[in-house]
């Protein structure tokens, strides 16, 4: 018996006798994903509540840093930037001196609003401010797994070595995957994995509020 002859002919015989079995063995099957709908569950903060929260955070930052000496803000795009600029303006009104504000561009790839994948990527840093030996406060809208903050810290230290780094967020929604905590928190919100915190700011969204959104499968 010619083993090689039967070896090459066997798949053809299998297709003739068991066509469906052949298809199942050699073709990958995909289960169609169910569409996901996102709807508003609750409004967490109004425009006036956001403003009062930022004023409180500005005072906390001043108190913990003993004023603005060597103080610098770094906003994480997108909504961390206008938050950083607002905090800097509030502090300037109090201290009569400006606080430098830099920017870090972190594209987040995760299963959330406007997300596409699994890990944050530093696209471009536009710090444009000195951070060596400075007390840097990184500012973001929502603290979730901590991966965005970790990527931002890596980018920050590639630009220089600050004296101290602190994190300020408007919302802490929990579910950390890394040992990262914020020194300054506007509000802590208990959430589930199916929920999303959506921060809307007038500089970016032409609206001013914080929403709790729910993801459901249709």
Image (tube, helix red, strand yellow):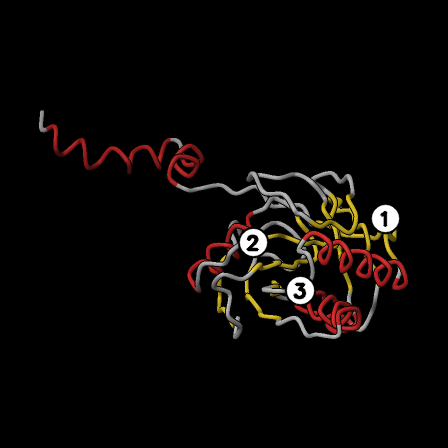
Q: Position of residue 194 (x, y in %)?
A: 72, 42
Q: Is mark 1 on a helix, strand or loop?
A: strand
Q: Can see residue 5?
A: yes
Pointer 3: what residue?
68
User: Which of disc 1 and disc 3 is earlier in sequence?
Assistant: 1
What whole-number distance in Å separates the C-alpha atoms at marks 3 and 1?
Answer: 39 Å
The numbered dot on residue 208 is none
Visible residue check, residue 74: no
Mark 2 neighbour class, 10 Å CA radius: few under 14, some 14 to 19, many 20 or more: some
Q: Tag 3, which secondary structure?
A: loop
**Residue drawn at point x = 74 percent, y = 72 percent:** 92
Tell me, for residue 165, which label it has, or none: 2
Judging depth in this view, the residue of 117 and 189 nearest the camera is 189
Measured Cα–Cα span from mark 2 to mark 1: 34 Å
Residue found at the very far left of the displayed protein: 2
Relative height, residue 103 to residue 153 (above, below) = below
Q: Mark 1 points at which residue?
A: 41
Q: Residue at x 70, y 74 (%)?
A: 97
The earlier-in-sequence mark between 3 and 2 is: 3
Q: x, y percentage for residue 201?
A: 77, 67
Most extreme residue toward the top is 1
The picture quadrant where one finds residue 57 is: bottom right
Which residue shows up at 55% across the image and 55% down it? 109
């Amino acid at each position: 018996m010619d083993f090689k002859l039967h070896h090459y002919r066997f798949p053809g015989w299998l297709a003739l006798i068991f066509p469906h079995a052949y298809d199942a063995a050699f073709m990958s099957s995909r289960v169609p994903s169910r569409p996901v709908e996102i709807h508003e569950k609750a409004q967490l903060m109004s425009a006036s509540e956001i403003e009062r929260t930022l004023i409180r955070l500005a005072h906390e930052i001043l108190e913990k840093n003993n004023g603005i000496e060597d103080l610098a803000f770094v906003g994480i795009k997108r909504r961390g930037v206008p938050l950083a600029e607002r905090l800097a303006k509030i502090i300037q009104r109090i201290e009569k001196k400006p606080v430098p504000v830099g920017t870090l561009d972190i594209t987040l790839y995760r299963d959330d609003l406007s997300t596409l994948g699994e890990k944050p990527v530093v696209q471009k840093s536009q710090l444009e401010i000195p951070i060596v030996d400075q007390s840097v406060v990184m500012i973001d809208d929502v603290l979730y797994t901590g991966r965005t903050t970790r990527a931002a810290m890596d980018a920050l230290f590639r630009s220089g070595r600050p004296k101290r780094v602190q994190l300020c967020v408007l919302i802490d929604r929990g579910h950390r995957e890394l040992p990262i905590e914020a020194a300054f928190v506007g509000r802590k919100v208990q959430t589930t994995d199916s929920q999303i915190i959506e921060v809307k700011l007038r500089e970016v969204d032409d609206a001013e509020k914080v929403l709790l959104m729910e993801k459901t499968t249709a």
